[in-house]
Amino acid sequence: MTEHTTALSVDFSRKLSRIKPMNAGNNGPKTPRADQTCGNFDTFRMLKIPYARLHDANLCVSYGAPHVVDIRAIFRDFDADPDDPASYDFTMTDIYLKALVRAGTEPFFRLGGSIEHNQKKWFTAVPPDFRKFAVICEHIIRHCTGDWADGLGLKITYWEIWNEPDLDADSAANKRCWQGTAAEFRELFCLTFKHLKKCFPDLKIGGPATAFPLRNPNSPGWKSRFFAELARRDIRLDFYSFHLYTSEPAMLFRLVREVRAYLDSHGQPQAESILNEWNYVSDWSDQWVYSLTQEAGIKGAAFALCVMLGCQKLPLDLLMYYDMRAGCGMNGLWHPVTFELQKPYYSYFMFEKLAALGTEVYSDSDSDEVQIVGAAAPDGRKAAVVGMFSNDDRPRMRRIEIKLLGLSDANRGNLSVRLMDDRLDCFEVPFELDGDVLKFPFKFKSCSGLLIQC
């Protein structure tokens, strides 16, 4: 029987669109202190992460928890005057935002509260006055992007209203993200959106970071009623944000397509589609520890690489890994204590090489388990990244060949190939360029990544 070879191709002469920010994440680096020098600022900065969503920053003492980002961490007394700068405590939030900007990353600001799993809640409570909540958000934006209250004057394009308000049903005993009802949230969202859009027409306002973007088993009518309320109030979102955790890239790709189709057919064709929480999760109970282990290893790295590459070709505007938070168990890129680099770091290292070149070129794969994206720069530099993923823990090997069209003589002379697998962290490997076909004298493991540069 003839052994199957996975056939890939890249045509660098066929320019497509820009490389999109598929390599964004949630949260940023830990800046080392003089007395505790452990941190990851330099290695974070090397990845050139385009955006960092600030959700759950207030769970991390390295950023200043419990005094950072969340509305009730900044505006601690809801009876205070929202027009008085003295009512706000921006200290730790300002430090965190400045660190992100120094790392070359634009903050993506979530207006609301970090998830609360405990029985008592502080940051996800229903604001007693929705209009006042909107005014508080307005002043936070004026401070961060302007000069109000010794403001920072930063570029922060995206402002997201709340997080996962649909995670728990109205009748749930222990709501984790929104303590009120779905109807109360719709009122809060719509009032806040309209107020902020009136104040800041050039900023992107949206949300609501849904846990169940299409089918909600806890609240079956949540989505349809939310979009109906947007239509009733003539609200056109700048972006719609949603979440998905899975162990199968195909499921994530299918959801991305379905969300875009839903937005287009339900009055929001202008809205950007943003998947701003995702990671490898087999399940949240029996397989939870297994999932965390895989997230930090080669399976999590291959999954992350394939998701980024696959979503580049899908109708998605922004993709944000959860979580790059310092010390978080779901942060596959850095060890939570030592900040040593882990396998998924190299997935982001490889995708950044595509982003640096700027323009996607045509590419194709004959296998659903193998993703490929090529990119080119105006100065003639070229690159391609290949991601191979299988959720099967049994060892599997595959042969691949890659047709590289549109190479110049200089490209051929400068060609290099780096491999990421369970042993190698983007180390150079041998290859043969037979005409236009890149061949390898070895087989690839089922979870691997390749960086081709010239």
Image (cartoon, rainbow, N blue to C red):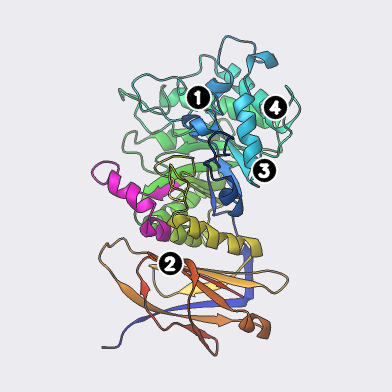
Instruction: For mark 2, give the secondary structure.
Output: loop
| Residue corresponding to mark 2 | 424
Q: What's the residue type where badge 3 is placed?
A: Arg
> Disc 4 or 2, which lies upstream in sequence?
4
> Disc 4 or 3, which lies upstream in sequence?
3
> Disc 1 or 4, which lies upstream in sequence?
1
Q: Residues within 10 Å of mark 4 (few under 14, many from 20)?
A: many
Q: Quadrant of residue 377?
A: bottom right
> Disc 2 or 1, which lies upstream in sequence?
1
Disc nearest the viewer among 4 and 2 = 2
Q: Residues within 10 Å of mark 1 (few under 14, many from 20)?
A: some
| Residue corresponding to mark 3 | 102
Evaluate if marks 4 and 2 touch, with contact meaning CB atoms under 8 Å apart.
no
Image position of 33 (left or right of 173): right
Q: Is residue 394 part of the magenta span, yes or no?
A: no
> Disc 3 or 2, which lies upstream in sequence?
3
| Residue corresponding to mark 4 | 143
On residue 133, which mark appears? Answer: none
Q: Residues within 10 Å of mark 3 (few under 14, many from 20)?
A: few
- Give x and y (percent) for residue 29: 55, 42
Read off the magenta span.
Answer: 278-303
- Work out whether residue 267 can be spotted: no
